[in-house]
Every structure is written in C-alpha cells, then in structure tokens.
Image: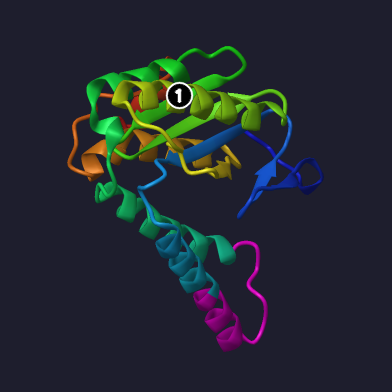
Amino acid sequence: MLLLTIDEITKRHGANLPHWTRPDSIYFVTFRQEDSVPLAVLEEMKEDQAREIRTKERTLKRALTPAERPTIVRKHRRAVEDYLDGGRGSCLLAKEENAKLLEETMLLQRTYELHAWSVMPNHAHAVLAVADESTFPKVMHSWKSFTSTMINRNEVRKGQFWQTESYDHLVRDEEDLIRCCRYVLNNPAKAGLPKRWTGCSSEVEITLRDLGLWE
C-alpha cells in the first residue's frame, strides 16, 4: 500500500502543467507524438475543464474540495485519451520497428521498476516506480530523447517527435495503482487494437488475477 502525506508531496512545474512528485513513488505517465493532439485542441479541452470547475463552484457557492475536483479532472482527461485513441496524426508508433524500439527502451529498467506499459499508434503509457523524485523526469527525458533520435532515423525525418510535456499522475494508493495498470493494459482493446506492445510485471499480473480483473 502506498501511503502518502501532504508533507511528502511537492509540486514540480513543467512548461504548461504542474507535476506532483515525492520520493519513492509510482507514476502513471502518457507521452504523445508531437502531431497527435494539436495544441489548439489541448487548450480548448483545458478551458472546458476550467469552465466546468468554475460553473460547479458558482452553483455550490464554494470552492471544490480535494475529493470533488479530481472527478472533473478525470472526466476531461478521458476526453484527451479518447482523442488520442482516434488515431490522429502520423501514428509512426503503429509501425512494428518503432513500437518495438520504444517497448525495448522502456524495458531496460535500470533506475526504475516498470509495472505496466502499452505502445499505441500515436502515444504510449507506462506505470513505473522510482526511488528518488529526481529520477522520474530523467527517465522520461532518456526514453524520449533516445527513441525520437532512432525513430527519426528510421523514418528519414527531422524535427520534434514527442510533445515536449508528458501527462503524469502520482499514484496515491494500491487501488489507484490497480486502476492505472488496468487502464494501460486495456487501452489497446478500448481503441480496437491488438495488445501486441503491451505488458506488465509478474506482480501486477498476479494481483489482477487474484482480484479477478485479468482480461
């Protein structure tokens, strides 16, 4: 069980989003191809979320509680995921050599423990544990830097391959960990795709089987 306290959690600001972090953590992360979701679409979705929060607070005549706010955030996060699953952009990760390259890069497991992963046509998901809070951004930079260089070489192309900023979620407890791992493992089927570049650790598989959640 992951037991987090407010004192342990800190906020790390990215280019556009705040990122929550703490030592000895597990993260659910989604990183996308540069052309998978246009910036204008992301900004519109972000404004829709802010508008719904403002409307809800006006109706309640108070600020949303920490328990109420995530419900709206998750709703709008699903809208982004649904957009991604629609297969927009060049979808270069649909090519076998590119998907295999990314999967093998994530499976190196030098400074982290990979619990679950999934490579989709225009984005990828991972659930990983790191012992030090500075490790997570380093892992993401390493994954994206190496794979962008290699895939650009494979495709005889230049320019940015990944969107600069990834979406990451600090896993709060065991229930949250199971939810995130199930999402990652089931994302291909949700998008009507085979689970070819998807997998999980033996511990996650055993836990899901014991709970009757393995699909």
Disc 1 secondary structure class:
helix
Which color scheme did the rendering employ for the protein?
A: rainbow
Residue denoted by label 1: 149
Q: Kindly tell me whether residue 215 is visible in this rendering.
A: no
Residue 186 in the image: state x and y as whole percent: 30, 37
Residue 83 in the image: state x and y as whole percent: 32, 55
- Residue 214, by quadrant, is top left
Is residue 103 shown in magenta?
A: no
- For the N terminus, the image quarter is top right
Q: Kindly tell me whether residue 80 is visible in this rendering.
A: yes
Is residue 65 shown in magenta?
A: yes
Residue 211 in the image: state x and y as whole percent: 37, 32
Magenta part of the chain: 51-67
Q: How many marks are shown on the rendered structure?
A: 1
Q: Residue at x 56, y 87 (%)?
A: 59
Q: Is residue 11 above or below residue 95?
A: below
Residue lying furthest right in this view?
7
Closest to the observer, 207 or 11: 11
Q: Is residue 130 above or below residue 175?
A: above
Q: Residue at x 57, y 35 (%)?
A: 27
- For the C terminus, the image quarter is top left
Q: Is residue 19 above or below residue 125?
A: below
Left or right: where does residue 66 sit relative to residue 161?
right
- Residue 203, by quadrant, is top left
Left or right: where does residue 201 sit relative to residue 67?
left
Residue 138 in the image: state x and y as whole percent: 64, 27
Left or right: where does residue 190 sit relative to residue 2?
left
Q: Residue at x 53, y 14 (%)?
A: 109
Assess disc 1: are there few (<14), some (14-19) or many (≥20) residues with their C-alpha within 10 Å of its C-alpha: some
Left or right: where does residue 115 sit relative to residue 129?
left
Give the residue type at disc 1. Answer: Thr
